[in-house]
Amino acid sequence: MLIPHGAVIALVDGENWEVLRNSGTEAEPELSVLATPELDETNHSSGNRHRVSSANPSGNQRDEDAHAAAVGDWLNAQVQTHKIEHLFVIASPRTLGELRHRYGKAVQAALAGELAKDLIGRQPSEVLAALRHE
């Protein structure tokens, strides 16, 4: 998979996230770790599908959904303000599914690739290798 210069790679799981950018070329990508923005994770509306009950006793799921919603909202804002032109999202499978509910049309257009894998905390070289194998 080719990664354009300046492309942003968002690594997301149910609790954490990281942002990387290709500071190299498309032919020779070099991923740089960016400062992870603070998120407002108070939006529990997407978690309504996973309410706490005897059938689903974990309130944790709601927190994970709120985290994914906050990341999705941040990505939407960044793409709409033209701060992200090309976007790759690598997220744990469940989180990726929740993120997809949050993608606006601009994010869908900017989305260059997705990978359902948990790569939080991995080295940029490992992230690059995972993207290249897709």
Image (cartoon, grey):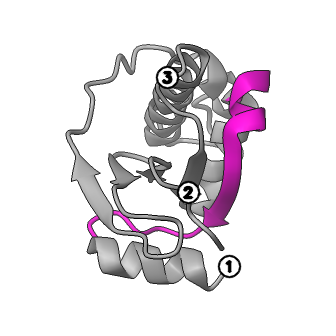
Amino acid type at image mark 3 = Gln
How many numbered discs? 3
In the picture provided, is 94 more to the left or to the right than 8?
right
Quarter of the figure with the N terminus = bottom right
Which image quadrant for residue 72?
top right
User: Mark 1 packing: few (<14 Cα in 10 Å), some, or many (20+)?
Assistant: few
Residue 113: in magenta span: yes
Q: In which quarter of the image is the C terminus?
A: bottom right
Give the CA distance from mark 2 to mark 3: 17 Å
Q: Name the residue under label 1.
A: 134
**Residue bounds of the magenta highlight:** 103-122
The image shows residue 2, relative to residue 64, as above or below, that is: below
Residue 78: mark: 3
Q: Which of the two residues, 7 or 122, is positioned nearer the viewer here? A: 7
The residue that disc 2 covers is 4
Classify residue 104 as left or right of residue 64.
right
Q: Which residue is drawn at 33% across and 63% down?
A: 31
- Precedes in sequence: disc 1 or disc 2: 2
Label 1 secondary element: loop
Label 2 with label 3: CB-CB less than 8 Å: no
- Within 10 Å of disc 3 (Cα), the crowding (few <14, some 14-19, many 20+) is some
Can you say whether 121 is above or below 89 in the image? below
Q: What residue type is labelled 2?
A: Pro
* Side of 62 relative to 94 (left or right): left
Tell me if mark 2 has few (under 14), some (14-19) or many (20+) residues whose alpha carbon lies within 10 angstroms of its own: many
Across and down, in percent, residue 127 comes to 42, 73
Tell whether 97 sits left or right of 47: right
Outermost residue, left direction?
35
* Residue 95 in sight: no
Q: Distance between the residues labelled 3 and 1?
A: 25 Å
